[in-house]
Amino acid sequence: MRSIPLRRWFAIVGVAIALVALGAVARGQTNWYPSKWGAADQRGAANRITPAKVLEARDLIKTGKLYQLGHVYEAGMPMYGTRHYSIRIPYPFAMPGKNQAVYHDEIISGEIGQIGTQFDGLGHLGIGDLFYNGNRRSEFAKAEGLAKLGVENVGAIVTRGVLIDVAKYKGVAQLAGNYEITPADIKGALQREGASIKPGDMVLFHTGWGSLWMKDNTKFGATEPGIGIAAGQMLVDAQVVVVGADTWGVEIMPNPDPTLSAPVHQLFLAKNGIYLHENLITEELARDNAYECMYSYAPLRLKGATGSPGNPIAIR
Amino acid sequence: MRSIPLRRWFAIVGVAIALVALGAVARGQTNWYPSKWGAADQRGAANRITPAKVLEARDLIKTGKLYQLGHVYEAGMPMYGTRHYSIRIPYPFAMPGKNQAVYHDEIISGEIGQIGTQFDGLGHLGIGDLFYNGNRRSEFAKAEGLAKLGVENVGAIVTRGVLIDVAKYKGVAQLAGNYEITPADIKGALQREGASIKPGDMVLFHTGWGSLWMKDNTKFGATEPGIGIAAGQMLVDAQVVVVGADTWGVEIMPNPDPTLSAPVHQLFLAKNGIYLHENLITEELARDNAYECMYSYAPLRLKGATGSPGNPIAIR
Amino acid sequence: MRSIPLRRWFAIVGVAIALVALGAVARGQTNWYPSKWGAADQRGAANRITPAKVLEARDLIKTGKLYQLGHVYEAGMPMYGTRHYSIRIPYPFAMPGKNQAVYHDEIISGEIGQIGTQFDGLGHLGIGDLFYNGNRRSEFAKAEGLAKLGVENVGAIVTRGVLIDVAKYKGVAQLAGNYEITPADIKGALQREGASIKPGDMVLFHTGWGSLWMKDNTKFGATEPGIGIAAGQMLVDAQVVVVGADTWGVEIMPNPDPTLSAPVHQLFLAKNGIYLHENLITEELARDNAYECMYSYAPLRLKGATGSPGNPIAIR
Amino acid sequence: MRSIPLRRWFAIVGVAIALVALGAVARGQTNWYPSKWGAADQRGAANRITPAKVLEARDLIKTGKLYQLGHVYEAGMPMYGTRHYSIRIPYPFAMPGKNQAVYHDEIISGEIGQIGTQFDGLGHLGIGDLFYNGNRRSEFAKAEGLAKLGVENVGAIVTRGVLIDVAKYKGVAQLAGNYEITPADIKGALQREGASIKPGDMVLFHTGWGSLWMKDNTKFGATEPGIGIAAGQMLVDAQVVVVGADTWGVEIMPNPDPTLSAPVHQLFLAKNGIYLHENLITEELARDNAYECMYSYAPLRLKGATGSPGNPIAIR
């Protein structure tokens, strides 16, 4: 058998490597952002909720005052794109018996994990086909529910909540609709408040934008102030669990870089397993200068869902 | 003018009184069960949630352990009557931009306030036309949502939770499907646990029936063990806020008196403004002998809804 | 025993009669508008569809040209009040097998019998509690579907269709939004067309208002030209089966008499069992001067529904 | 420059060809089954509905008798997989005015194009990524509706309908649940009936399986008799427009070849643009020996939907 020239070897090996690489891409098996909680993890930053963190949150309850952070779900509330919400009360049902029991319930339809006050799960948004922990949408997204990363995996989140009142820090009632919250804003606002962010926290931004809810829905939904990529990275580094705001997307929308859509969602959900909590009510907390609280929330365990509605509670 | 004979006077006056009475009935203005929180009250026993009660609950958090009390919502779960639950994941949406943001959400339809783990609001069940605080279904029930008694009025409920493990007290893993929990059972179980019920508490029954969930749905839904009228009255007298259980209706179903349907629902909701929390997971609490906890739950603020889904949290 | 004076007799008898009458009203048993098709009838004017009528319609097919009278159902179409329509395509289902069968379907929610092109059934609208043939809403309307008068009772309607082009008769492209079509208009338009109305016909009005559909939905839905009570009575007398139009309500809305809402609906549905077909496409028929056709339509047999969507066909 | 050996040329060219072919597959641009109605066609065999075909159907109307071919849509009807159907009647709406107009409508949710009597559009089922006329699911399937092949493109179908009573031909009331209808059966049954299939026809199979509807839903849905691939090809060659049956899938299910799922759906929808009409009522036609009729049906114009519900009409 005669020898193969070196150049030919290079060509053959090169083609082989290229084919294998293309195959891997085609099969979508590369995980550029492995989870620090292991290859099988579906809970992301919720793993940071430990008994110690719960006890830390407990110690922030001083007065027993409760705050509902969730908006009322109702016809006419702001909704993204063509999402919808419908509620109807059917005719009542009369039960048999001399005690005349009569009941009714409600029929609801809508994208209820992604309208109104909403908690974004890890199956909501990704980078092309790539979602949290290297999971591929083309593999786990199914008609009857996500086969992985469904919001039922999150579990209860009871932790320290930190309110960052950027509006007050900037001396305004409401940030402008195109205002990007920066790392310096976060530092400055925390310094003003005498507060700090610790690993495992829930961070809650007050921008004042939420006062437009059901007052000027068009303006509310057109743009929003919010954190940019730099502030997002700062929160990733701080190892938080959930980032919420009184806006519909938490991050600045549209992004100042016109070639980017929702990059902070990608940074949080797909790359770091950190959750977003959108359309929260922060006004009362801000009015009370309530910068620390227990945040108590457990997503509805909707099997295979991308998010959850809710009425999270802040307790002081 | 001649005088009118006395008998005639009686007749006329009698007819007049009867007509007025009939008119009152027809207009439904009699309130047989006025709320102790005033004629305008729509919150019922949720008024018992005070800052002091929250602080009392705080002090029950000793270990930082969290319990999810809510079931997974999924196709095939037990549902009452012809209620339904459907979830579908639509095709994803690709956002513009070089960062390839892609998202999807979920379409859900169903009686989501009255399926799976569910919290019964005061607009859910009444006595003929009469609901909580003298409100008439014929007046407040509207196609687009209840005009009164909607679950959005309840607010956050953070309070002391007391687990009453009747199964363990009776020395069984699961009460029989027609077992009526009596006042003596409650007293006995509490005594065994060294626990007690205080005003403002959430009371949670462990019957073992919940272990049938998604295992034998037919048996689970056919009947259920639960409190009878006497035990219900005992809890009313104890001034609780919410009564929950690992069953679909909290009270014994069907009622031992075949002429009655859901009389404890009427006693709680219509007459006393006390809420029911159905289809809760109690197994883990029972296993841990966790008889006291902080119960943290806020119904979804679904405007005009009769109930709410949820994933209530117990914290110890 | 002494005699009772005559005046007293009158009084007693009068009260008795009044009480009986009031009782009848309260029980809702008076049928002011008995159906000419019998006390059990639920089909109303659909009884006029006979084999002879079908054959009459057959003979109107001369060219074989088909007209779709139904609009496209789509997001953004005009809808009355807070009705909604949502369609989503879930992720596909892959079937097992080497032939790679893959399918998807659609999830739809909405008041689909009462949005877009819609056929009003006899259970849709009444006079207080009174619906067609003396049926009482309080008795037949049930959460899971109307127990009587559901649209599944109507059956197939194949009959002669008559287009009445009132716009052309009045020399305009579009009638004004507050224009009441009168008996004189009907007579005049028919005379111009050389057409006539016969018992059992479907009558179809072209007003030009339909050209606003998806062009100016706000104007389209704010008011509409249409028949008034007098024209409605003329059609009742003519013994038609269905009255349709290129408007959302067929009759003039709002009614010129500000104390009346939808009186022609009552005249047709509740008193005479005549159907309405709303939001039809009439432009192409009008352009073709197609004044007679076979109208072919069968409501979806939605058990207990108040109406039906559809795509009725005109054939010439 | 030295010459390249022939073998090497073959290798290089071979690799290049393979890469280009793989690329084409990856991009999904090959159209193995081009439509005979042009590259832009979305209507498939509905193009065969011509005025001449309508006139041919007209001439089949002899008696004026109407047949509803659509089942009642109701709770408990057979449904494939986890599809659902829910209908509820909300509380009524009272309109202003002294004439007491009161109306209600219905809330419906479900896969209404793919439950009950259903018409499969060309966007319903394909071969991997490949659908009718080379359209790729990965390109045209969108969350808010199919961007191509939506059922709104079909148009009205009025044509000659031919009933093929295979049950009667085989001398049974009901074909067995695993019976494959063959070309010989079709020929034999047509010969017995004295009927024939012509281009542009709608073909309707009576198997007797439909008598299980709402009688034995479990058996009805477990399997079904129906045409196999050979009979399907015969109908393709006969240039029909729609093939319907009194079964849930028209074709034999499961396929006798266990490696195939729904191959006749692929043959009809993806390769030939022929529609399926499922869960039709054929009993009355069969009883009347009504082998020819006018079939009149127009799918609901549900934008971007994969199918349509309906109540098709047969007229004789």
Image (cartoon, coloured by chain):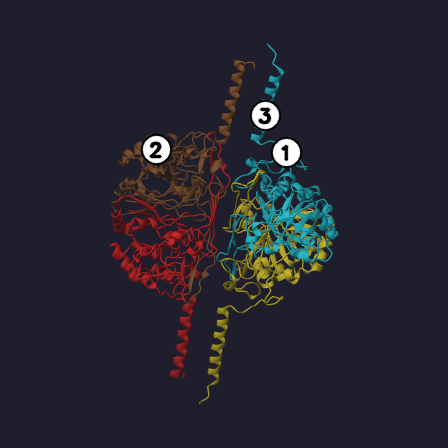
Chain colours: A red, B brown, C cyan, D yellow
Q: Is residue C188 above or below residue D16?
A: above
Measured Cα–Cα span from mark 2 to mark 1: 52 Å
Tag in front: 2 or 1: 1
Mark 3 and 2 residues: CB-CB less than 8 Å, in contact?
Answer: no
The answer to whether any part of residue B170 appears in the image is yes
**Residue B235 - label:** 2
Q: Quadrant of the N terminus of chain A?
A: bottom left
Kind of residue sitting beneath label 1: Trp
C61, D61: nearer the viewer: C61
**Residue C32 - label:** 1
The answer to whether any part of residue C66 appears in the image is no
Image position, residue A185 (x, y; %): 30, 60
Kind of residue sitting beneath label 3: Ala
Q: Is residue C274 above or below residue A271?
A: above
Marks 1 and 3, the one that precedes in the sequence: 3
Mark 1 belongs to chain: C
**Residue A293 - label:** none
The residue wearing badge 3 is: C18
Q: Residue at point 56% right, 14% down?
A: B2
Measured Cα–Cα span from mark 3 to mark 2: 48 Å
Image position, residue A200 (x, y; %): 28, 55
